[in-house]
Structures are given as C-alpha cells and as structure tokens.
Image: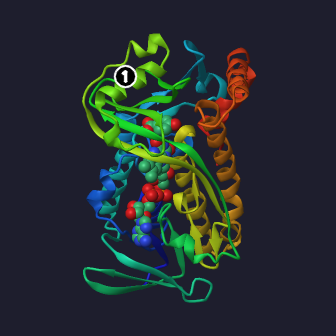
Amino acid sequence: MKTQVAIIGAGPAGTLLSLILHQRGVSSVVIERQSKHYVLDRVRAGVLEWTSVELLESIGMGQRLHAEGHRHDRVKIGWGGNEILDIEFEKLAGRPMMAYGQTKIQEDLYAAVDHEGLDIVFESSDVELHDVTGDSPYVTFTAGGESQRIDCDYIAGCDGQHGVSRTAIPDHVKTDYERAYPFGWLGILSETPPLPHLLYANNERGFALCSERNPMLSRYYVQCPLDDTVKDWSDDRFWSELTARLPDDQAAQVVTGPSIEKSIAPLRSQVIEPMQYGNLFLAGDAAHIVPPTGAKGLNLAIADVHYLSGAFVARYGGDATKLEAYSETALRRVWSSVRFSWWMTVLLHRFPDESPFDQRMREEDLAYLTRSETARASVAQQYVGLDY
Ligand code: FAS
Ligand code: PHB
C-alpha cells in the first residue's frame, strides 16, 4: 500500500487524525492492534473541553454530541468534611464543559470513518516503523495472517501509552519526564441517575469523583491503593466508601445500584520530548499521559490532532514551517495540561507518606479557593482549557 500519512493506532487520536486529513484532501491508512469491538468496549474519558467540542463540530460530529452530551457550567469540590466550593466555568472562564463519554466519541468517529470509506486495518500485529529519518519511511505489520507494508511520506504515532511509535525515537534523542502516583482510581459505571454536577472530593479517607455518561448512567471513582484489585471491591464496599468521602448533602443524593463495569487505573504523569523525530510525529497518549484528575487526557489528544492535522495540510500546500514546529507548538499546551493535572491530583488526593503539614497546606489551598474568586477563575480557565 502507499499513502501520504501512515497512522498507528485507531483510538481517538488516530481515528480523528485520519478523518480530518481525509476532509482536507490528505490520504492516510490507520493500523490498529485490537479489534474494533475491543476499542469500543474500553471505558475511559468523560468530559470535553469546549475547544474539543468545537473541533468535533467542525468536522460534522456535533449532532449526537449536542443531542446526548450534557453541558456543565461548573464543577463542585467537596473538602474539609462538609465544605463545598463551586468552580463556575461559564461565569469565570466564559465557556462550559461537555460531559460526553469517550466511548460515544469513538463510536461517532468509527461511524464517520465507515461513512467516508476510510482505511482502518484492525487486528494488526508486529507493527514496525522503518526509515523514519530517511526519505522513504514505511510501516510493516501482519494482518489477516499476511505480512503487509505501507509506504508513506509521514508516520503518525497515535498508539497510546504502550505503543511502539515512541520507541522509534532513540533514547539519546528523547527525554522521558515521568511521575507515578502512589495510588490508583477504582471506577464503576452504574445504571443510576448521576448527581446534577460533577463533584470532586478530598476527604481524610481519600479522593472521590462523581461524574456521568447520560441521565441514567453514572460514572464514579474512588482513590484506592495501587495493589488493590477489583476483587477487593464489592459494590457494597464501593458505595459505602464513595458516600463516606462526599459531603453529607451530596452523599444523600447518590442513587446506588449494581455496577455494570468496574476497573482500576494507575495514575501517572509522563511527557516524551520531542513529539517528532524525522518523519515520525507523536500525538495523544503516545506522547503524554496525565492523571485523569484534570480531565485532560482525551482533550490533549484532540488538541495534538488539531495541530498535527493542520501541519500536514500546510505541508502538502507547500508550507513546511508548521510541521517543523509541531512538537514545540503541541508541547506548550501539553505542559500546561500536565501541570494542571498534577496540581489537581496533589490538591485532591491523600498521599500515603504525607505529613500533617502537607494536609494543612492542602486545606489552605482549598480555603483560599473558597475565599478568592480570582483563584477560582484561575482554576476555571485551566480546567476548561486554553484556546488552540
Ligand atoms: P489510546 O490509548 O486511546 O489509543 C491508542 C490505540 O493504539 C489503541 O486503540 C491501541 O490498541 C492502539 N495500539 C497500541 N499499540 C499499537 C501497536 N503496536 N500497533 C497498532 N496499534 C496499537 N482521560 C480522561 O480525560 N478522563 C478519564 O477518566 C480517563 N480515564 C482513563 C482510563 C484508562 C484505563 C486509560 C488507559 C486512560 C484514561 N484516560 C482518561 C485517558 C484516555 O482517555 C486517553 O487520553 C485517550 O484514550 C488518548 O487517546 P489516544 O491517544 O488515541 O490513545
Ligand atoms: C469521567 O467522567 O470519567 C471523568 C470526569 C472528570 C475527570 C475524570 C474522569 O477529571
């Protein structure tokens, strides 16, 4: 096969990139390790920045998003037992957020790919990148039991945190910034009505988060020890722990029910610099990982694709400057989101080895946010995301 851009990974980043390039007249082929069903079955992000909403609208994916998404004008933060502070996005940052699950985004992306007749090769294996810094890059892989090769001008590594693309950047070229957190998030889905607002909670028992997927599908999380497994968490134990970590008046509103999905995700911050090497360009989790506390993971992947798709289109229009500057451009937003996600994680979790002083500083941060609209406006602006 021959194409202009070979894309590795058909998660949100790879699929969105292929769609935008197609609409702008640039050809691509996407190579995905898993089956379509497997990718669609993953439960991940739930909240979109407005810049992400506007980008999806711009490629014709706004209809279901607005029909089934839920606009939020604030998030609530519970702390100090029964204190609650509101971070009012629209009032303080001029735009809302949209609760619309990644699963639905992936469904919409695959539907658009099918409609446009684009190429995604699912269940590929042995993906290898070749001649990345040469004039004739290509990708080899196995699919349908046969060895395949795609000759291309560029390779987009959209293969997530365990992908092969990032390993194609030599260790002496790349810098890997990383911090692992000493806890995980246990998440459940339940077919129950969610709370009216997203609610984060810092409690002496640990972090909790109340979110949603639709008016009859709730998404809840509690901080848990890294060595826990879902077997350690019956539904009863989960609901009891979640409500114990929420302010009383919020806990009283939680409608419990059987979990239909339960999983534990470790939390990590990671950035690979640079996000490009020769004719290879990384986008999404392939280049960076954030703890979900700031709701940035999926939004960063979408932002990378905004920059990278524009750079490829400009390149084929004769202007290579954006492509040469892609890593520098994308990393500005990446580092801003990585810092915000790290700050929110330190603010809202309890760390196993922390001192009473650390908790007092945390409470002072939360008390200052409660007192200062200026401080809340700063959080609101970072939570809703910067302009592209
Ligand atoms: P993805 O990982 O989604 O997609 C990469 C794709 O590449 C995958 O389909 C994979 O199968 C494929 N691939 C990997 N190696 C390959 C190879 N060698 N060859 C071919 N294909 C290959 N973000 C939030 O904002 N909020 C959340 O609550 C949240 N929860 C999360 C929970 C979990 C368990 C995880 C892992 C992530 C979570 N995230 C969350 C972050 C998540 O939403 C990512 O930011 C988002 O999926 C990034 O999209 P991609 O960059 O496309 O990477
Ligand atoms: C979610 O709905 O899954 C969600 C919401 C906000 C976050 C993380 C996850 O910060």
| Residue under the point 26% across and 30% down | 191
| Residue under the point 70% across and 18% down | 367
Figure coloring: rainbow
Q: Which of the two residues, 344 or 90, is positioned nearer the viewer here?
A: 344
Number of other residues with Cα within 10 Å of mark 1, as a class: few under 14, some 14 to 19, many 20 or more:
few
Q: Which of the two residues, 340 or 27, is positioned nearer the viewer here?
A: 340
Whether 318 is drawn above or below 210: the answer is below
Whether 347 is drawn above or below 127: the answer is above
Residue at image mark 1: 240
Whether 237 is drawn above or below 296: the answer is above
- Residue 44 on image: x %, y %: 41, 46
Residue 282, quarter of picture: bottom right
Residue 147, quarter of picture: bottom left
Q: Would residue 233 be found to the left or right of residue 89 on screen?
A: left
Answer whether residue 57 is visible to the viewer in this image. no
Q: Which of the two residues, 333 or 293, is positioned nearer the viewer here?
A: 293
Answer whether residue 270 is visible to the viewer in this image. yes
- SS of the residue under disc 1: helix
How many numbered circles are shown? 1
Q: Would residue 1 be found to the left or right of residue 317 on screen?
A: left
| Residue under the point 41% across and 59% down | 11
- Residue 203 on image: x %, y %: 55, 23
Quarter the N terminus occupies: bottom left
> Please, what is the three-letter code of the amino acid marked with disc 1?
Ser
